[in-house]
Amino acid sequence: MQTDLLKKIELNLRAGNQLTYDLLNDISELSDWDIQIVNNFILRVKRSIELGRVEFIYKYFDAFDSAPQNYFKTNNKLDLLVCQLRRNESDYYLTDAKNRLVIPDELSKHDFFEIWGYDVTTARNICINHALQHNFKYVLFIDDDILAPNNALLRLYNTHKSKNSLVTAAQYFKKINPLISAHANIPSDSNDVLETDLVAMGFTLIDLEEILKSVPLPLFWNFIDKNGIWSMGEDAFFTKNIISYTNKKPIIDTSIKCLHFDKAYKTMYGVREKDTQYASHIWDIDRNVFFKNRTPVKFPPLQLSLPRRSHTSPIAFNPTKLLTYRTYYMYLEQVVNQPVDVARNMLVEIALQRDAEFVLFLDDDIIPPHDILPKLIDSFYDIKYNIDDSICCIAGNYYLKDNTLLLSAHLNTDTESGKVMEINKLPPSQKNQKYIKSNWLVALGCSLIHTDVFKQMRKPYFVCYDITNENRLVNEDAHFTELVLRSGYNLYIDPSIECLHYDFIKNTYVGVYDPKVKYATDINLI
């Protein structure tokens, strides 16, 4: 499909007209694949008009409009263009292609092309344009976060010849655990040569001369629709385009395993093979660039949520004395003069708008240990990764402000007696567990909740029922617990995290004071 047609469509729409009969007739003659592109393009143009924008990504490829199908005009062909993409000029790449990567003898006429400062789709198309201008037959893409074996290209080229493929790629893995191939439908433990419906471009050899005999430019295009109508990355578009025009799928040689480095979290994905030599890049940069690349990513937000009775009501804990978790940035949000269920719902909405990962509820009469936040997070992920990945909430323990006995604020149903009881009254087989899974009520006065659970449940998340109305003794804690359990999530209490429950009327606390514990409070507890 030529971009001339897209230009005519855009000009027609920008002039305030509907598509003409001639344009509709031209569109009707396209393949189903090209019609999808046109439909998405029309949506993007209309959205662009609404936003008052005039630029469009396809205009980067105007130089291709007048190019004939036979792009290679002379016999003076070059063999290989090695293209390395970086995010910006001060970014670094892992594979030292110039000095460490073995180039096959048959590709002796090769050159290197580094590009930065563009989005990945534009960068790849600029590389293709450069290859066309200088008459290269092959293009090798190497992404900046890929570390390839020294002989990766040599082996890749041999596979390319033996399979007579158009696109051949090495195996590498997504930046997640457990390891999953970056290519579609490729087993992570395979050592075979396989076809794929989606080839990731991290270390990929393209037979540009053969491809352009039937596939139109641009080779790369991305469709990112915020409304979710149709989204497609540049690698998915490229693969679909190749398959649609040539009926040949890209080839993945899974025996060539590259490593994939997460620069933000300094983590390598993939198995480094002991007997393999890698084309590791020698990072020779100045001091300023080094520290710029050592800047951490923005910490995920964690919201400390405090429901308060009034602007002047006292707070038992001091937020500034809480030990923060280094991985998170903590915000303090307060809602004042609202019923507790309304306040909690409002605080959750603020956290979701902020895209916080956790909500930490601390009520104004709770005195927590100063290290409660890292303890709750550690307990949460200990349970998630080792016990129950359906966990959504972990709570510290505290007791009711009762004059008779120290009663836990949390309730469970003892399966043997069938009675609802405080967790400190459970049978030893249940009470002495490291974590107690709740099936009845988790008190929210000291609770860490992952925000994913709110995205899966209906609103309101918290509701208080009046005991005088319908005679039901149910508070917002119980309502939330029931809603969570019915949504397939689980809630836990960590009894080792002991908080104190402060009574402002009597100026005393309920709970077991530990002189060895540092409490996040300004109140003198001795």
Image (tube, rainbow, N blue to C red):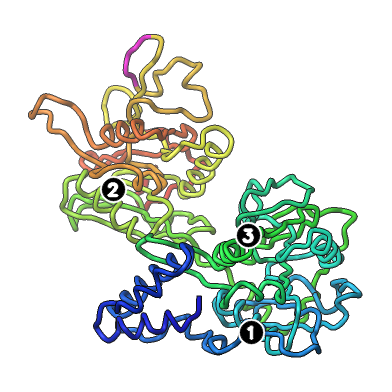
Assign a secondary structure to mark 1.
helix
Instruction: Please state which of residues 283 and 219 is positioned toward the viewer in this rendering.
Output: 219
Horizontal and vertical percent position of residue 268:
70, 58
Horizontal and vertical percent position of residue 147:
76, 65
* Quarter holding residue 143: bottom right
Q: Is residue 134 above or below residue 144?
A: below
- Identify the residue at image location x=34%, y=84%: 53
Per the image, the residue denoted by label 3 is: 247
Q: Is residue 154 above or below residue 83?
A: above
- The label on residue 129 is 1
Horizontal and vertical percent position of residue 419:
32, 14
Instruction: Please state which of residues 506 and 423 is positioned toward the viewer in this rendering.
Output: 423
Query: Mark 3: which amino acid?
Result: Asn
Per the image, the residue denoted by label 2 is: 364
One can see residue 361 in this view = no
Q: Is residue 54 above or below residue 302?
A: below
Query: Mark 2: which amino acid?
Result: Asp
Disc 1/disc 3 C-alpha distance (Å): 24 Å
Nearest-to-viewer mark from 1 and 2: 1
Q: Is residue 124 above or below residue 390?
A: below
